[in-house]
Structure formats: structure tokens, C-alpha cells
Image (cartoon, grey):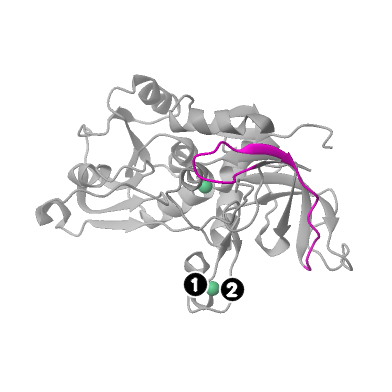
Amino acid sequence: MKAMVFEKCGLPLKLVSLPIPPLKPGQLLLKVSACGVCRTDLHIIEGDLKEAKLPLVPGHEIVGRVEALAAGEDHKTSPFRIGERVGVPWLGQTCADCRFCLSERENLCDHPKFTGYNLDGGYATHTVADRNYCFRLPDAISDQEAAPLLCAGLIGWRTLKLAGEGKRLGIYGFGAAAHIITQVALFQGREVYAFTRPGDLSGQDYARSLGAIWAGNCDQMPPQKLDAALIFAPAGELVPLALKASEKGASIVCGGIHMSDIPSFPYAALWQERSIKSVANLTRQDAVEFLEIAGRIPVRAKVNLYPLNEANQALSDLKHGRFHGAAVLTMPDPSP
Ligand SMILES: [Zn+2]
Ligand SMILES: [Zn+2]
């Protein structure tokens, strides 16, 4: 199999040939067809997240087809058949035994493993995944469009859920998660107010084209106060800005895994039952709920395609905001 491998901070990913890993009980061998490129991959490669296995195959928005089941398993014992399409998200494994796993909060598991971080991921022609953390994908959505649903969509969905039912929804940082969650929020009958970097008129136009009722700079006040705000950009200074733009009782939910420091702000900005929360990871129940609604809408992800061996370019374009929507790696075919 071919893979783009992360060896050390500061080095670009390297295209290498690797042996196909042997399967442990319960694992699936997948032939990858598409893998999304997430901002978390950038945080791993740039060293903001420090617990990556090394060397590592990044990538946790994987769409593939089952090529083999573990020894001794067949269609009677495995929930997935050979050839079936599955998606693999960030949550790669949990312990099923800690107080968080035992209280339906497996996203906070004490001993988790994450795809493309502690486990090899999908920047590769093949990958291995635990079948208990794989999902069927909606038929109405292509492989390439389904890839960004597996993190941008899922984490976005959990962020939206934690924001509550408010009608006027602010979204700060209009990237992959925002462009998916805007579609879900509109489907639910909410209004979306999109906030971008100051002067990013193209991003604001893009948000309006998706149905945002208003789009502006992140330091602007929206025409109506927000009932809730989702912050997807990794910039701590957005938190006080979102508080300032929000109505009494609003929830401000930070959807990223990493964020710069939040500047101090007066208590009066938080008072009146405003709250600030973070989202960590996802539960498998989030995936079941989100993939169902994503198929029903159906969500249309805007994908910018890169061949596997151009993963470094995709990461650089993501870092510098050179595209709207999501970057997705496609695999060479036929896979050697
Ligand atoms: Zn656990
Ligand atoms: Zn991600």
C-alpha cells in the first residue's frame, strides 16, 4: 500500500510504500477511496497536538470499501460485508470501561484512540479500522462528498447540539465544518449569521450563497443578537467577540481541538446566563444521528480534490485559506 507518512514536526509528509497491516479480531481492511484533510491534521503535523504515534499515517475522514475481514470472520459474524462502503471517523476506539464510557460520554473516554493520531489513518490507499467504530454512509452522497462529513460534519453536529435550540445561530470561521453545519441549521429552520476574518469578502459571499441571512467580519455586530454561536476558527479572541454579539442565555460553543489563548473579558459580558463550552471528539451516537440527517437533507459538501501524493499541498492550502469548503484526498487507482 502507498501512504503519506508524518515522521517528525517540521518535515513534509513523505510518500512511502508500506506492507498491509495484519488484521486483529474485529478489524476491517479498507481500500480507501477518499480521505478528508482536517485542521486537526495541521495541528498534529505542526506539533500543537503532541501525542501522535510516530511515524503516523494521518487522516480521520476516511471513506473506503471493505477488502478483508479478520481471520475467522465472515458475513455472519461481521456487521460489514466485503465490498461494502464504510466511513471511519476521528473516534477510533474507546475503553468501554471508564466512568465516561459507562455514562454515555465515550467522547471523553480516559483511554481513547483516535484515527490518524494514535492509530494510522486514511492518507493511504488502505487502512485498518475497528468495525465497531465504522459507519455506513448515506447512499445519496458520493465518496468524495462523504469524507468531510466524518469530522467536519460530525464535530460540527456535536457543536450544534451543544449550542441548544436557539434560532439565531452565529458561526465564526467559515471553513469545512461551517459550510456543512449551515446546511443542517437551515434545514432545521434556523437563521445563520456567518463571521469571517476581517475583509474576507469572498468567504462572506460564499456563506451568503449557502443561505446565511447575514455575513460579516468577526469583529462586527450582527443585525440581531445571537441565541448561540459556534466557533470553528482556532482563535481565542473570537470568544469575547461572540459573547458581545450574543443575546441573554446564549451558548458559545468552541468546536476546535486547539485554540489560541482566550483574552480576558469583563464578567458583565458573560452575565445573564451566557455560557462558554468546548466540544471534545464525538460519540458513536452523534455519528448515527448526523449521518441520518445528512442523508435526508442531503448535505452537499464543496470538495477540493487532491491526489494522495499532493497531501502537503492540500494542508498548505487549508492553512492559508486558499479554498472554500473542504480538501479531500483521492487515491490512485488501481492501488498497487
Ligand atoms: Zn473509556
Ligand atoms: Zn478532524
Judging depth in this view, the residue of 80 and 7 nearest the camera is 7
Residue 223 on image: x %, y %: 21, 32
Judging depth in this view, the residue of 247 and 158 nearest the camera is 158
Give the residues drawn in magenta, as a range: 5-25
Q: Are marks 1 and 2 in contact (CB under 8 Å)?
A: yes
Q: Is mark 1 within 8 Å of ligand 1?
A: yes
Q: Is residue 75 above or below residue 303?
A: below
Locate residue 272: give its quadrant.
Answer: bottom left
Disc 2 is placed on an element classified as: loop
Residue 16 on image: x %, y %: 72, 40
In the image: residue 133, left or right of residue 68: left
Q: Is residue 289 above or below residue 167?
A: below
Locate residue 114: give its quadrant.
Answer: bottom right
Magenta stretch: residue 146 in it? no
Q: What residue lies at 63% left-to-right and 57% top-to-bottom?
A: 119
At label 2, the amino acid type is: Cys
At label 1, the amino acid type is: Asp
Residue 301 shows up from this direction: no
Q: What residue lies at 60% left-to-right and 51% top-to-bottom?
A: 116
Question: Mark 2 = which residue?
Answer: 95
Q: Is mark 2 within 8 Å of ligand 1?
A: yes
Q: Is residue 228 above or below residue 10?
A: below
In the image: residue 169, left or right of residue 305: left
Question: Mark 1 = which residue?
Answer: 110
Q: What residue lies at 36% left-to-right and 53% top-to-bottom?
A: 165
Magenta residues, dominant SS class: loop
Magenta stretch: residue 17 in it? yes
Q: Which mark is residue 213?
A: none
Residue 216 shows up from this direction: yes
Which quarter of the figure is the N terminus placed in? top right
